[in-house]
Each structure stands twice: as structure tokens, then as C-alpha cells.
Amino acid sequence: MDAAVSTLTALAIFASTVGHAAYRSVQGYRVVGRKGGGWVRWERWVERQFVLSLSFPRCVEVALPAAAPRILPAGWRSRPVFREGQTVDTWRCIVAFDSVAAVAPSSPPPPVLSPFVNPQLQYLSNLYNDLLMVFRFREEKTVPQLVNSKQPIRCGEQGKTSDLGDASESDSDGDCQSGKELAPPVQKHTRANRKHIDSITLVDIAQYFHLPIRDASKTLKIGVSILKRKCRQYGIPRWPHRKIKSLDSLIHDLEFVLAREDEDEEEEKQLQKDRLAAAINALTKRKSMLESEKETIQQKPAMDLMAETKLFREDVFKRRYRAKSSVMDMD
């Protein structure tokens, strides 16, 4: 099985009715991959469990208890569809999205599922990326308003509104262009406190290597140029977000391929058991190497990707391009 291209089609998030900060997600993906000289499509569903809280130091994914009942029914044949308010055992659905069944979230997500309120979500790359795709989060920008609640005065209208204007008001008329409103005052950005900048350590910065540098600077409450200067002080010539994101993407693709190989193993184990076992071992080893390299880069962000990883990434990009081109031809 070659590298596959996956697209999110469904996302349902359930909150536990008995456990504090316990959540589960059910994600459905449409996957396109090459097999046996041809292109095939299938759906893959994943159930995960998390500990999410605004007060915890870090959001984490935990293993599903072996004896606990699943939200995804065992041996299901028809495509599952979840809706907000639906309960499954001790779990209640709080977010539901399904592009196939035309199910959309009825409201913005709770604060614990909003990256702007709970930035620790970004440690969970799969859940974070799927939430971004469903809700299309954008940072809200506040527009400065004039202190005076009255409508803006146009040039040439002051004589109509009041006959008691002072000299400064009459002088300002000559500087205005006819028909243009007075511009609102420009809001100035406050500079970060010097003590706060000096108190930021390498450990503080390393927590946000997985974010773009602008998001990291906002979280640290300093400017981008200041953050770059701090990085140079600690021997980091370039912000490592792109390298970490690239490794996450490669690991995510390998997870899909490994899961698909596990599903096909039962069907083809009589004919291709040895070949499948060797392929799964090779993919598992590759995934372990990528995860190890990711941890190393998080500790040493100045280190470049290994040459073998760059070649593998280039091969994956080519396979993705061929897969996307095939999907367009099939459509």
C-alpha cells in the first residue's frame, strides 16, 4: 500500500458525564490510496480519548480502557452518524460535524475545545487540525472606536449642527477634504516589559516550537522580533515550526497506512502473510525513527532534518500529488 491521502468527513466529540476532564473523539476520514496498480477509496474511523482542561498544564491523549464500552459500535456495517445531545453509555455528544450527512455544529465549541482559549490543544495535532478544519478559527481583531458616541462630522456640516464652535473647530475645516469622515485615532501597541522579556527562558520558548512564530510570540506576550532575538541568544538560528509540522504530517500518514495494512491483513494473510508482516515492520520502524527525530529537534531546534527523512518526505509529496491527481480524474 502506497502513501494515502486522507480527508476529514466527520468529527464528533463526547464529554464524560461521570469523569472530570474526560473527552472522546470519533473521527471519520475518506482515504484514497494506490493498491495493486489501481486507486482505491475507503473510509477510516478512529476513536480516541483525551484529558482536556483549562487548568491542567497540558492536554494529553490517553489509551482507551480495554474493558470500557466504545462509542463506535463493534462490527458496525452502516455509516455512523452522531448529533449534538446524543448520549452513548456515559458519554454525551457536545460537538457534531458530518459533511456526508449534512450535520454542522449548532454553536461555537466550548472553551476547552477552542485553541484561542485553550492553547494546550495544539499538543494534540490530530484533534487540533480537525477542529481548525470544522470551525475555521480566526483571531478576532478589535476595531478602535471614538470616545464620542455621536456620528462622525463631515466637513462643511459644523455650521448646521452648532453656532458655538470655537476657533479650533473652524480652523480644522480647511484641512478636511469635502465628503470625508474624520479618521479614528490609531491604536498603539504596548511594548513588553523588560523584566518579562528577561524572564523568558529556553524552556518557556521550547513549549511553543510546534506553533508558528507569530502565534508563539502572542502566547508569550512579546513581539516577533524580540522572540527572534531571544532565539539567537539561545543558539536557534531558525524557528523549528516547519520541521516539526513536516514530521507530524509524515507520522500521521504512516498511521493511516499502518491502520489500513492491519485491516487488510486478515483478508490476505493466506497469500501475502510474509510480505505484509515485513511491510508493517518497516513502516513501524520508520514511524519510530520519525518520532525519535521529532523529539530530538524539539530539544535541539537548530539541528536539520536527516537526509534520509528529506528523501522520504519528497517521496511522500510525490505520492500525494499522484493521489490527488487521480481523485480529480475519478471525479
Image: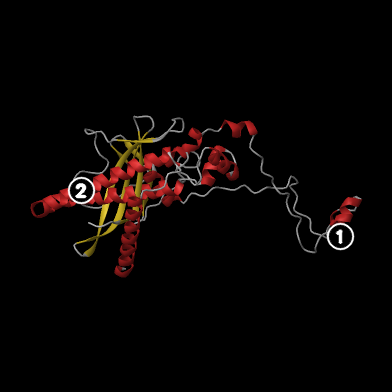
Q: Are marks 1 and 2 in contact (CB under 8 Å)?
A: no
Which residue corresponds to the image point at 38% horizontal and 39% vertical from the top-left?
A: 296
Q: Upstream in the sequence, badge 1 or badge 2? A: 1
Which residue corresponds to the image point at 17% horizontal and 49% vertical from the top-left?
A: 278
Q: Which residue is mark 1?
A: 174
Query: Which residue occupies the foreground of this view, 198 or 131?
Result: 198
Query: Is 187 on the left-hand or right-hand side of 87?
Result: right
Q: Which amino acid, by three-letter code, is at mark 1? A: Gly
Residue 80 shows in this picture: no
Q: Position of residue 322 (x, y in %)?
A: 31, 64
Provide the secondary structure element on which disc 1 rests.
Answer: loop
Q: Which residue is mark 2?
A: 280
State whether residue 166 is above or below residue 110: below
State whether residue 231 is above or below residue 175: above
Q: Nearer the viewer, mark 1 or mark 2?
A: 2
Provide the secondary structure element on which disc 2 rests.
Answer: helix
